[in-house]
Amino acid sequence: MAIVGPTLLHDPVHNRGSAFALEDRPRLGLEGLLPPGVDTLETQIARVHLQLGTLDSDLQKYLLLSDLQARNETLYYATLMSDPATFMPLVYTPTVGEACQKYDHILRATRGLYLPITAKGRLKSLIANWPEKDIRFIVVTDGERILGLGDLGVNGMGIPVGKLALYTVCAGVPPEMTLPITLDVGTNNQTYLDDPLYLGLRQPRVRGAEYDAFIEEFVSTINEMFPKCCIQWEDFANINAVPILERYKDRTCTYNDDIQGTAAVAVAGIYGALRISKQKLTDQTFLFLGGGSAATGIAELISQAMVLEGLTIEEARARNWLFDVNGLMVNSRTDIAGFQKPFTHDHAAVASFVDAIEQIKPTGIVGVSTVPKLFNQAVIEAMARINERPIIFPYSNPTSRSECTAEEAYKWSEGRAIFASGSPFQPVRLGDKTFIPGQGNNVYIFPAMGMAVLATQASRVTEDMFIVAAQAVAELVTQEELDSGLIYPPQHDIRAASLHVAARIAQRIFDNGLAGVERPADIAAQIEAMAYQPVYPKV
């Protein structure tokens, strides 16, 4: 039976709101339910822009857009695609961080699936409640390490929802093929446990064998119900993120964006930086502030990229160092985890980050600590003394957690820093030059990876696919943009950039024999043809 009347106006997939044609309204039972005027999609977009302009805060704009997504999906995506550089910070980082912290207080319409560990043993019946049966992408979190904000429990659902919206906006992955999921295993955040409005399980986080069995049931059920689906792990704590990726990366189509996506966008930034400094990758040394999965993921992908340029893997890893709350990670320390060992080297203990810079003499520093202001004036000045063009990458999100600002990096290095950050910063005027800081946003990677996997029906996601993605991102930056300090493509061109990167990744998938479909004559054209366009469906 066709959807008609008020039901149609409450169906976000088929609802056109004021854009229903006059001649269609009698047939659809809509006469009298809408004003007599008829909008085009373009005038509806203009109205949304006007409404957003009346709001005082980014969180209010986030809520308006969330309501729009729940009411009129086509208009939502059309609006975001009308100005992606403006809307990406509203639907994802940095605004999504505040939204997640307050998610149980601002919740209006639910989106996605919540799978509590109390439903262990019957996940299939819960997942079967989702109406779409051809799911190709799942972004899943357990909410323990949301951005740099920590354990937010089920409030972390804003991350999978926002991430999948960008799959569609940036690379054209059809929204009906995406599914955000939160695995609720409890929370150790006492503020939420004491909050009467918190909507998750009111229990401490489950650990160990019970947790692992829950993850195993989840993966097995997804593979059974959605055999062509790719699972993206998002914002899991290090103690779970690394083992989960190791356990499943060779069993199913899966990746961890915090580890591999962050690594790829960092490597893309390094490729861009080297276009400015005119140096070789194999001559670089990197010091990471932070020793978690993001740091080791970036360090490993840098190492793999160096191997492609002639180093052995041992030589490459020796050029990547970690520094955490206990100082430089050296072999004499007894608190080193297994995933950190490849980047733990023979060296005397060093307690000060500035001292580590002076002794190791890195060409670049990468901040993934989630602690703000640790790239202080002494740090930046030390990097500028050692390097003509120091690479300064404070990648922690959201903006409030950034290790330094763009203005600080440029000012303290006398304009010589090659800068990129995890969250956006405004252009910086220094003397007679304006610097445009780049944002090392994973959005350059994961939507393109998603579209490439969709177009090829890839059976696996491999490390070299991320190196290809990084190279493809870096090659899009023009010389004029490099001259202004920009090492990533402008975000207003993110759609074209993502489709270009997707085509490059897809080529590698076909070359590696991982595709589930025949190789087309023109991969780029095939991907362009598959990409979602915000057009109202027929009713």
Image (cartoon, rainbow, N blue to C red):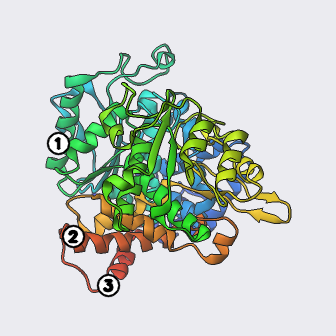
- Against 509, residue 206 (above or below) is above
Tell me if residue 257 can be seen. no
Q: Residue furthest top?
A: 194
Is the Cβ of the residue at disc 1 closer than 8 Å to that at disc 2? no
Residue flagged by tag 2: what amino acid is it? Answer: Asn
The CA distance from mark 3 to mark 2 is 17 Å
Whether tag 3 and tag 2 are in contact, CB under 8 A, the answer is: no
Q: Residues within 10 Å of mark 2 (few under 14, many from 20)?
A: few
Task: Name the spot of residue 102 as percent of width and height, x first.
Answer: 55, 30
Q: Give percent across and percent down for residue 266.
A: 49, 55
Which residue does the image show at 36% across and 82% down from the upper left? 525
Q: CA distance from mark 1 to mark 3?
A: 35 Å
Taking the spot 47% from the left edge, 48% from the top edge, the residue there is 162
Q: Dot 2 corresponds to which residue?
A: 512
Disc 1 marks a residue whose amino acid type is: Thr
Secondary structure beneath dot 2 equals loop
**Circle 1 sits on which residue?**
221
Residue in the picture at 35% in, 22% down: 186
Tell me if 473 is positioned left or right of 36 in this view. Answer: left
In the picture, residue 397 is in which quadrant?
top right
Among numbered discs 3 and 2, the one appearing first in the sequence? 2
SS at badge 1: helix
User: Label 3 belongs to which residue?
Assistant: 522
